Image (spheres, helix red, strand yellow):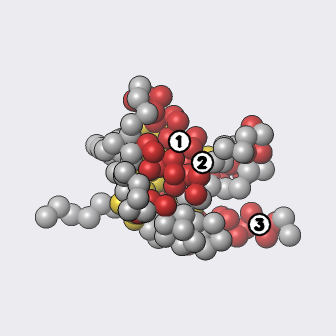
Amino acid sequence: MSAPIDWRDPMRLALGEARAALATGDVPIGAVVLDAAGGVIGVGRNVREAEHDPTGHAEVVALRAAARRRGEWRLDGCTLVVTLEPCTMCAGAAVLARVDRVVLGAWDDKAGAVGSLWDVVRDRRLNHRPEVVGGVLADESSALLEEFFAARR
């Protein structure tokens, strides 16, 4: 049996993307896509405000970048690492992109779709079900979001 994978370093990269989203007034969520060897092939951060794009979620941005780099939309063998549990749109995008796993930081009880509010990625009716690894550097991810929203209240 192989040793468990330490997802903290890729999550730190995603947290860096989340911090960069703050500069544009976007919710601080970041994502990276890793290939099967663990190399970064896509990065993304929320750009809804910066680009006036309702689909500008970190996961979608990172998946698009990875697909462009690979030259195909199928991202089998890849892992999506994201600072916050994906919403329904992003969970669906992960399923449709055929990623092997979704690694997340904080759980999202209000809009999470990989186990909290919904469980899109493990819906038996779908043709692909990525593995889910949750709670990686969850405190750091949560703190960033809490600070962001506290400043807006």
Tell me which amino acid carries mark 2: Ala
Percent position (x, y) of residue 38?
A: 33, 46
Per the image, the residue denoted by label 1 is 62
Marking on residue 149: 3
**Residue at the image position 65 percent from the left and 71 percent from the top:** 110
Q: Nearer the viewer, residue 89 or 4?
A: 89
**Residue at the image position 77 percent from the left and 66 percent from the top:** 149
Q: Is residue 6 above or below residue 21?
A: below
Per the image, the residue denoted by label 2 is 58
Answer whether residue 147 is visible to the viewer in this image: yes
Left or right of residue 127, residue 58 in this image: right
Closest to the camera, between mark 1 and mark 3, is: 1
Percent position (x, y) of residue 95?
A: 44, 50
Tell me which amino acid carries mark 1: Ala
> Which numbered disc, 3 or 2, marks the residue that appears first in the sequence?
2
Q: Quadrant of the C terminus?
A: bottom right
Q: Secondary structure at mark 1?
A: helix
Q: Secondary structure at mark 2?
A: helix
> Which numbered disc, 1 or 3, marks the residue that appears first in the sequence?
1
Rate crowding at label 1 as few (under 14), some (14 to 19) or many (20 or more) other CA atoms within 10 Å. Answer: many
Closest to the camera, between mark 3 and mark 2, is: 2
Percent position (x, y) of residue 148?
A: 74, 63
**Residue at the image position 66 percent from the left and 44 percent from the top:** 55
User: CA gap, disc 3 to disc 2?
Assistant: 18 Å
Rate crowding at label 2 as few (under 14), some (14 to 19) or many (20 or more) other CA atoms within 10 Å. Answer: many
Q: Are marks 1 and 2 in contact (CB under 8 Å)?
A: yes
Q: Is residue 109 above or below residue 53?
A: below
Answer whether residue 40 is visible to the viewer in this image: no
